[in-house]
Image (cartoon, helix red, strand yellow):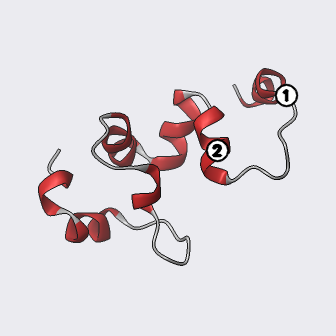
Amino acid sequence: PKDERTQLMGQIDANISFKEFFNLTDNFFQKEWLGPKRYKLYKEGQFDFDKFFDPKGRLYTLDELRELDERTFKI
């Protein structure tokens, strides 16, 4: 639950990257943030976290990910 997350994680260093923060979060947060398809690709090791983002740091859409790597994206 949202009101318990702060208590579970405690204070976070302001200098960590989002990737480092993301790796500290639980599966529920990761699935909510990535969405079910990206989460499955991430958890199965088919996509590294960084592969979900374009060079400007924007999250790729599922269609864009499919175009980038059609072979891996088949789920």
What residue is shown at x 48% (from left), y 65% (from top)? 59
Q: Amino acid at mark 1?
A: Gly
The image quadrant that residue 39 belongs to is top left
**Which sits in the foreground, 41 or 19?**
19
Local secondary structure at mark 2 = helix
What residue is shown at x 47% (from left), y 48% (from top)? 34
Q: Which mark is residue 10?
A: 1
Check disc 2 and report the residue beneath it.
Answer: 20
* Above or below, 1 relative to 59: above
Q: Amino acid at mark 2?
A: Glu
Q: Position of residue 49 (x, y in %)?
A: 45, 51
| Residue contact between numbered discs 1 and 2, judged by CB atoms under 8 Å | no
- Residue with the most extreme front position: 15
Dot 1 or dot 2, earlier in sequence:
1
Give left or right: position of 68 versus 2: left
Q: Position of residue 4 (x, y in %)?
A: 78, 23
* Above or below, 41 relative to 26: below
The crowding category of the residue bearing disc 2, from other C-alpha atoms within 10 Å (few below 14, some 14 to 19, many at least 20), is few
Give left or right: position of 37 versus 15: left
